[in-house]
Structures are given as C-alpha cells and as structure tokens.
Image: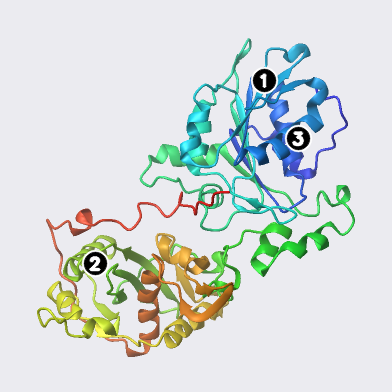
Amino acid sequence: MIDFRYRPLPTAQKIHKDPREMVAIVGPWGSGKSTIAAVDLYMHIEKYNCDALIVRDTYPALRDSCVSKWMEMFAPAGEINMGPPPTFYFHGRLKGRKVMFRSAESPEDIGKFQSVECGCAWLEEVCPGLLPGGSLNLGIAPEVLSGVLGRIRKWHTPSGQGQRRMLLSSLPPPTTRHWFHSLFYDRRPLLKGVAESLEAHLTEQVALYKVSPDENLAHLPPNYYEMQTAFLTSEDQVQRFIRGEVGGGYGSAAVYAEQWNDEAHIREVTAIPGPMILGIDGGLDAAAVWMQLQPSGRLAALAELCTNGLGLEDFGYAVIQQGNRLFGSRMYDIWTDPAIFARSQNDGKNGAWYLGKAGLRARPAPQNPDIRISAVRTWLSRMASTGALFQVHPRCEMLIEGFRGAYHWKRSGGVILVGHAEKNEFSHVHDACQYASAALQYRGQQAALPRLPNVDILGKMVPIRQSIVGQRTRRRA
C-alpha cells in the first residue's frame, strides 16, 4: 500500500470504491482532482499488478504537472527515467511494473500509444481552458480518448481476469459544446447511430464525479480563490473555474445567456394532434424548426432540420419528408425569411416560389432581429407552476447548442457587439426559430403537407454535421 498519510475527501472515497471502468472527475481550481486520480491509479496498479499510462496535452504540461505530481507522491516506490518520454519503474513487490507518460493533444498523436499496453490510464485536463495563474490548457481530442482506450486491457491475475480502469480529470469543467460534456453529462455517444447495447454500456460503465470547491479548502492557501479571480475576465469563467459548474464558454456574448436553462427548457415534449408552426430560414444553408403551441399555453420546439448548400426546392421536399416521418400528415403555419420573397435576377423566380413548388406556401415573418430575438426571450422567460412555457425536444441538438451559447454576438477587439449575431452553423436554425416565434400572432392554417413515398431527399443531402459532438477548436502553442 502507499506509505504516506492520505485522507481521501468524501468524493474521493466514493471514487476509490466505484468498480466502473471509466471515471470522470470534474471540479474547480484547487479541488484536489489530480491527487484523487493519482491515488486511484496507484490502487489499481497494486490490485491488478499492471502497468499504467498517464496522458496530458503537451509535453511541458505533462512534465511539470503529471510527472511532478506522481514523483511528489510516489518517489519512494521506484525511480523515473525522464526519457523522453518519461517512464516510472517500480521497486519492491511491484518490480517489473511501470507508469508511462505521454503527451497527446490531437488525433495525430495517437501513434504515440502503438507500443503501449496497460491495465489503467489517467487522462489529465482533457478540457481546454485557463489554469491557475492564467496559463492556457489546450485539452485533449476525443480521438485520443479512443486511442488510449484501445490500449487498455483487462489485466489477467492468478485469481482470474482483472478490471480495466480509465480516469479522466477535467479542469475546468467542460463547456456545454465539448465532447466531454456530451459523453459524461448527456450520456450521448460521440458517434451517432451506435448500437443500443453500446449506449447501455455507456450508462452502466461510465461514472461522473463532481468535486465540490469546499472539500479541499482546508489544504489551500488563505484567500486562494479570491486571488485566482484576478486572472478571470467573465462571469462564465468564474462559474467554471471557481464554482466548478458547467458553462457555455461564451459568457455574456451568448444571445440567450440570461434566459436559457438546460434543466428548465429541455424536455421530451410529445406533439399533440392538430396544426404545427414551421419556421424556415431560406439561406444557402437552409434550416427549419417544427414548433407547436399546445392547449396548456406551452410552446414546444419539437424538431429541426439543418442543411448545407441544398437548393430551396429540394429543401422543401426534405422538410415535407422529415415532417411526415416524425409527425405524420399535418397542417402547417409556415413563416420564413422575408428576403426569399425578393425576385431572382436570373429566372425571375424567388426563393418562396421554389418552396411553393415543393408544397410549402410560406409567409414573410418579421425581419427586424430585435423583434425576433425579443420574441424568443419572452417565451424563454415565461414560467408556470408546471415549469417553463418554452421547451425544446432533445432531438433539436443544434438549436440547444445555440441556446447554450453557440449562437452568440460578434466580438471585435474584445468588445461584444450586442445586436449583431455571429453567422455560423447555429445561426440558421435560430433564425428559423425566431421567425416562427415572432410570427405567432399571425397564426393561420394551410393545407396538409402531402406524403412523398419513394422520395429520399434527406438521404441525398450533405449533412451540416454528422454529430455536433467531438468537434473542438484547435489551438496550438
């Protein structure tokens, strides 16, 4: 056993007793996550007499944090060869076992694990963000997680087959658009369409532990958190780095930062019989949102369709097919971008004509962004005894990510340009949502959309993204 005095925090005690294969640990600065992960890794090495792997994004960070922390705690148990790459060799009854250190940030770094075989691994600081003192942490790509997992084996012991173990430490807690959040908070596989058995395995064998900022307070210098706030520039950073809570990563630049709440606004709402509202943004990357005003007074966003470079006629057929597939034949009140009613210079036909050819007869919604955004904010702010009056179905992934902050104001020279939304892959579906929300006062009914058997426009589309998770902004030192 380890030969120094270790008093596990309450959360650490639960982690050390948890038998699941993959354990994620999140918390603010100074919460003791690295110590918990290092001790748990050692306990697994000792129990199953196996090798271990420790991974960090860059080599300097690996050397200065992971290697330093390991030697601080376990130097008497062996000796280290700094390589590179560094390798720690045990003495005593663990002689012959080792801990390998590797730096890996991007998918190209997976090759560093080709000769590795171990029984447990620890990935340190997998999410990008600021570290204490203001230094930058690049984070780790999801491909690295997959590469490491492929090198971990269930370790055989004289008494039978051992248990493999992977630890992931995240400082800071992830933004809502990071793969770590999708995997451990939403419990959503990084690759869509995986077998149900794999989804069940994800739930059964993956654990998430959140370390409270108060647990390790006695071991920190006086006024530790007050001093660290000097390096922070937004409430979102304080939320993530000091309080240890998930943030959107955009702070006050998020268009709906003041109104959106995951717990209040995300629900598996069921469509009721009757007409629906369809908001359409008819730009180059056309998007649609299916909404329904229900008898309870609740406005539900039930589905979305995001495309990439699909012509408006084909987009119209795709909307019809998607709507029929999800909701059957319906009557729609359709509102769209007024710009598509401008006459084309080429053939004299406008975008609305092409939508109409596909069977979608739309009306122009208010164009003023202030009116549209204000309408959505009003709905988000409405509450009743049964909960929020605006709810979004989890299948609307792009819409939800936009509400979390991916739909945000432009920035220029560090200044947030309120009133000028950034045009990105999330803005199109949010424009569609705004057109429908702002035009609710003009509700009407249209003919039911026709069924289109033997038409597979959706299958021919170039999807905007196969998955909104697993994407990350790469920043190189």
- Residues at marks 3 and 2, CA–CA distance in whole angstroms: 56 Å
Which residue occupies 16% across, 70% down?
313
Q: Amino acid at mark 1?
A: Lys
Nearer to us in this view, 11 or 418: 418
**In the image, residue 458 lies at what x, y percent?**
22, 57
Q: Is residue 14 visible?
A: no
| Local SS, label 2 | helix
| Local SS, label 1 | strand
In the rendered structure, are the residues bearing label 1 and label 3 in contact, judged by CB atoms less than 8 Å apart?
Answer: no
* Mark 3 residue crowding within 10 angstroms, few (<14) / some (14–19) / many (20+): few
**In the image, residue 409 lies at what x, y percent?**
50, 75
Query: Which residue matches tag 2?
Result: 319
Query: Which residue matches tag 1?
Result: 98
- Residues at marks 1 and 3, CA–CA distance in whole angstroms: 16 Å
The number of discs equals: 3
Query: Which residue matches tag 3?
Result: 68
* Mark 1 residue crowding within 10 angstroms, few (<14) / some (14–19) / many (20+): many
**Mark 2, mark 1: which one is toward the viewer?**
1
**Mark 3, mark 2: which one is toward the viewer?**
3
Q: Amino acid at mark 3?
A: Ser
Classify 98 as above or below 347.
Answer: above
In the rendered structure, are the residues bearing label 2 and label 1 in contact, judged by CB atoms less than 8 Å apart?
Answer: no
| Local SS, label 3 | helix
- Which residue, as the protein is rendered here, is positioned at the far left? 347
- N-terminal-most mark, 1 or 3: 3
Q: Amino acid at mark 2?
A: Val
Which residue occupies 67% across, 20% down?
98
* Image quarter of residue 153: top right
**In the image, residue 448 lies at what x, y percent?**
19, 75
